[in-house]
Image: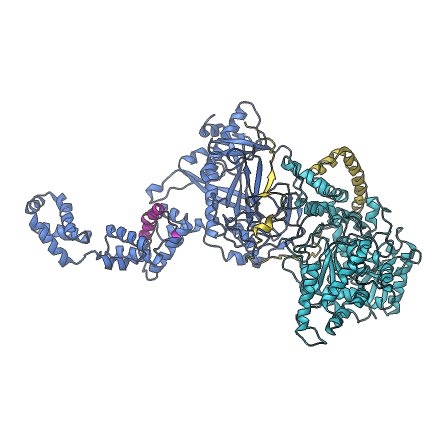
Chain colours: A cyan, B blue, C yellow
Amino acid sequence: MNNLIHDYPKLSIAEIQAGLAAREFSATELAEAALMRIAQIDPLVKSFLEITPDLAITAAQGIDQAIASVSAGSLPEECGTLAGVPMAYKDNLNLTGTHTTCASKMLESYISPYTATSISNTLIAGALPLGKLNLDEFAFGSSTETSIFGPTHNPWDLERVPGGSSGGSAAAVAAGLATATLGGDTGGSIRQPASFCGVVGYKPSYGMVSRHGAIGFGPSLDQVGPFARSVADAAAVTDAIALYDPADTASQHTSVKMTDYLTLGVKGMRIGYVPELLELDGLTAEMRRADEDAMQRLQDLGAVLIPIELPHARAALAAYYTIGPAEAFSCLSRFDAVRYGYAERNASNLTELYERSRTQGFGPEAIRRIVLGCYLLSAGVIDQYYYKANQIRTLIRADYQQAFTICDAIVTPASPRAAFRFGEITDPVSMHASDIYTVPVNIAGNGGMSLPIGFGDKTGLPISLQIIGPQLVDQNIFQVAAALEETYDFERLAPMVLEELITPMSLEGGAA
Amino acid sequence: MKTIDEVLLDWEAVIGLEVHTELTTLQTKMFCSCAFDFGEAANSEVCPVCLGLPGALPVPNQAAIESIVLAGLATGCDIMPDTMFYRKHYFYPDMTKNYQITQGPLAFCMNGEIELEVSGKAAEQRIDQQGTMPLTSEPDQSTSQTEGYRTKIGITRIHMEEDAGKLIHIGGTDGRITGADYSLVDYNRCGTPLIELVTEPDLRTPEEARLFLQKLRLIYLTLGISNVSMEEGSLRCDGNISLRRRGDQQFGTKTELKNMNSFRNLHDGLEYEICRQAEVLENGGLVRQETRHWEPATKRTIAMRSKEAAEDYRYFPDPDLTPFHLTDEFIESIRARLAELPDDKNNRYVEKLGLPLVDAANLAGDPQLSSFFEAAFATLSDNLANESAVSELARPIANLLLNDVSAWLNQTGTALADALFTPSGIAALVSLGQDGTLSSRQLKDVFAEMATSGKSPTEIVEEQGLRQVSDSAAIEGFITKAMAANPDKVAEYQAGKTGLLGFFVGQVMREMQGQGNPRLISEMLSKRLDEN
Amino acid sequence: MPLTDEQVSIAVSEAKFALSESDLAELKVDLNKIIESIEVLNEFDLSGVEPTYHPLADLQNVMREDVIQPSMPQSVALANAATHEDGQFKVPTILVDGGGDQ
C-alpha cells in the first residue's frame, strides 16, 4: 500500500489494469492511494472542488468483487477498459449526488440530479470517480482565475496559472492526483491548460463525445474530452467516452478505436503546417523553436511536411467572441433563481429576484459575456456580427476541408506562450488572444490535441504542439501524437510531485 | 356602445387568429421523453430537459414532426423542406430555460387556407362580399336553403414549438396576477408539443372567426393529432383585431385579445373588442397597441400590457438541434396517412350515400360519430345492389345515430367510445326495423335496452318477445275480434267515416300488445272494412 | 460601432442584471474593447456566403421515437429550488406593466 501511494501517480492505464490482473494491488487500494495523495498534495494545487471518497471506494469495491470471481492473471469481462483508473471531472459535468458548481456562486449549492453521459461512460468502463475539478466560472476564462473558489495552481510553478478553463483537470493530472480527467473545450479550454501543465489534452471532433450533462456555454463549439499523461491513456479514455448517445442530437456512431492507431507510425503521412501562424507577434521564440523542433522530428520519422494556408483563421477569434457570448447569453438565461441556483431571498418581486440573483450569482467575466451576447443578438445588431460570424464559420470550415485534401493532419502551436503568472493578464482582449491557435478548431468542429513537446529553453515551462485532424477522422491525431511522443523522453509529472515521490510519505503523516 | 351590426356598417373589422394546439395524442413531450398527462401531481412529469436543468439537451419527437406535417397537408399548406428550430428569448417563470424552442422565419408549414361557409343571420354581418362566393341553394333540401357565402381564410404558417408551464397566482382576487402575493409554477405542461397556426388577417366578423376555429378543430380531430379541448387548454386562440373605415386600404392599429377559452368567448370577445375600438375611434381617440384580456363574467376586455415597444426576442437557430430536411418521400408517406377531411366526408355523405344535407354535416362534424356510422354502415353495405339501396340503409342509420343515440349519450353523459352498444349492433337494429321485424316504437325500446345492458338487438327481441307480428293469419284473427266488438263503429266507417281506420288500428294493436306491424294491420283493416 | 450608454443599459436590463453606474461604465469600456476586436468580421467580403450554424453541417433530421421514459420524482425536481410550496416552485409577485383599464 505504501508503495502504491508512492508509485500510483506514475502508473499508466495499461499498468493499472495489468497490476489489477496480476493482483499486485486492488482497486480499493488504488482508490485509497489516490484519495490520500489528493489530501496531501491538493492543498497546494487546489485542483479539486469536491472529493468523492464514497463514490470512489464503492466503485473500487465493485471492481474488486468482480476480480475476485476470476482466477489471477486476468480481469473479468465485466471489468471495462478503465477498470480501476482513478479519474476526476471538470465541475461543469453533472454527476448525480455531487455538487456541480461551475465554479460559480450561482451553482454553489446545486446538487446534480443526473449524470453527464461522458462521466457515466467512464464509470461504466470502471473508472474510480475521485471528485470534481476547478475551472473558470462557467468556463469563461483561460486561467481558472475567475473561479469563485479561487484559482488552481500550476503544479510546475505554483505561482503560475494552470490555464483554463479546464485548469483543474490539467493540474490534477500533472500533479499525479488522477490518472486521467475529463474537461470541456469551447475555444481551447482543454488544449491550452494541457499545454500549460505539460499533459496530453484532447478535444474530440464535434459530435464524438456526448455533450449531454456538460454545462457548456457555447453549444455549437463545446466538446468534452480527456486529459492524461500519455497519448495511450488519452486514447483509452477517448475510446470509453466516444460512444453514440441518443440524448445528444450531434452524437455520432463510430466503430473507430483510437487505441488501434498508436503504433502505426507517421511514415508517408502528410502533415500540414501554417507558416503564417508561426509568424504571429504573440508567439514566443521558445515556443516557435520547440514547435519547429517537433516538426523536424516528424519529418525524421518519415512524415511529409506540407505548408498550407488557413486564410480565414485571423477572423476566428472574432467569430468565436461573437458566437460564444451570443450562445452564452441564451444558455445562461435559465439561471433565474426559480428552479435552482443562487436566489436573492429578499426580492420583493420577480424582476428583483431575477436581477439581484443573477447580478450576485454571476461573476464579472460571466456578466460581461452574457451582456455582450445579449447585445450581439439584438435586433439590428445580429446581422452585423452574429450572422457574419457564422458566415466566417463557413469559410473557416472550407479552409480546413481544403487543407485536408492535401494533408492528413495539421500541426500548430497550442498556445502563443507558456503559463503566465497570476494577475499577469487582466485585459479581457489580451486574455482572449491566448486562444488564437485553438479557437479556429472549435469554429470548424474538428478535433485537436495538445501534445507536450518539452520545456521552454528560457522559462523551463511545459510547451505543447497542437495536432488537428480532419473532422471526425480523429484517429489521424492519435497516430501522429503517439509517434511523436515516442521521440521524447521527459517526465510528465510536475517536479513538486516528483520531490514528494523521492521522499515517500508515511501513511500516518500528511493524510487528512 | 353601438351594436356590432351598427359598427360593421361603417367599419370593417380585420381579424387574424393565432391558434395554439397541444398535440395531446402523442405519448411524450416535444424535446424529451416525459409523458404529459393532464391532471397529474405538480412537477411529477419533468426531467432534466423539460425542467431546463443545466447541461440537458433537447431531442425532437419524430411523431410531433409527423403531426405538424399532417396538419399542414390538411390545411393546404406548403411543407417547407428546409427549416430549423430557433430560440425565442424572454424571461418568464413559466419557462424553464427562459427561451422557447420554436421556429424561425420558415415554419414546417406555410401558405395554407381553409374555406368557410357562412350562412344565416351572421352572413349579413359581412357587408363587403369582396373575395367571397355566394352559397348556392341546395336543390332538394328545403331546410338547408339559405342565404350565405363561402370565403377562403389564408393560413400564414403553422410552426412547431414547446408549451410553457402553468402559473397560479396566490393572494389576489380570482387568481388574477395583479395584486397576487406570489405565484406557483408547475412545469408538467412545459415542453408539451405545441403547434401554432397563424392566419392571415382575412377574417371580417366574429362569426367567421368562430367558424374558422370550429372547422380547424374538426380538422385536427379528424387527423387525430389532438383532443383540441378549449376547456383543458389543448386548443387556445388569441385574436388580433383592428378596424378600418369601409373603403380604406390601410390597416388600423391592432390589439391582441387573449383568454377566449371557448367558441362563445371567442365570438363574444371579438364582438366586444370591435365595438370598443369603434367607440374609441368614433370619439376621436386612438386605439393603443396592446394586449387585452377578455373577461367573460363582465363581458368586456381589459388592457394587460402595452406593446408599443416591440419586444426583442433575439431569435437565433438553436445550436442544440440539427436542421431539418424533409424529403418528398417523407412528406408523401405522411400524406398517405391523411384521413378523409371533414369537407370531403360531408360531400361523400351527400353525393354517395344520399344523406340529407343537415345529417351529412352533423355526422361529418363529429369524427367519433361518423366513424361509428361508417363502421355500422360497413357491416351491412357489402351486399347492396344499387345506390337507392345504399341510401335506404344509410339514412336510417344516420337518423338513429343523430337522434336516439346522440340524445341518449347526451342524457347519460356517456362518451360514444364508452358505450355498450357496437356499430354492428346498431346496424342489426336498423335492419330489424327495415325488414319490418320491429316497429319504430319497438326499435327505440330495443335501443334503450342495448344501451343499458349491452345485449344484442336479436337477444333482446327474443327475450322480450318483442318481435313485430307480421303474420297475416294472426292479425286477421285480431281484426275479426276488433270488428266484432265494435259493430257500431264498423257501421259508421262503412257509412263513410273512414277516419275511424285509426281507431281500429289502435284496437288491434292494443290487443296485440303493441307487437303488430302497424303498416300491415292498417292495410288489412281497410281491406276488411271495405269488403263488408 | 462602439456601444452607447443606452445600448449597454438595455442589454444589461434585458439580460436581467442590475449594475451600479460605475459598474456600467466599466462594463461599457470592456464591451467596446471586445466589439472593436470583433470588427474584423466586417473586413471580409461575405456576399453570397451561407452561414453555418451547426458544426456538423451535413447532420439533419435527428429525432427520437415517441416513447415514454420515466420522469423524475417531484421531490427531486424541487430539491434545488430556493422556495417551493405544494409541490410547485414559488416566485415572488409578478409585476405586470400596463394593467390599467380602459
Q: Which quarter of the rendered picture does the N terminus of chain A lie within?
A: bottom right
Q: Residue at x 48, y 47 (%)?
A: B228
- State the image quarter where residue A32 is shown: bottom right
Q: Is residue A11 visible?
A: no
Give yes or no for residue B410 being in the magenta stretch: yes
Report x, y in % for residue A56: 70, 61
Q: Position of residue B44 (x, y in %)?
A: 55, 50
Q: Quadrant of the C terminus of chain A?
A: bottom right
Q: Nearer the viewer, residue A343 or A511?
A: A511
Q: In the orientation shown, which residue stands out farthest toward the top?
A: B283
Residue found at x 48% / y 35%: B205
Q: Nearer the viewer, residue A486 or A29?
A: A29
Q: Main secondary structure of the magenta part?
A: helix
Is residue B505 in the magenta section?
A: no
- Judging depth in this view, the residue of A221 and B393 nearest the camera is A221
Q: In this picture, which residue range is highlighted in magenta?
A: B395-416
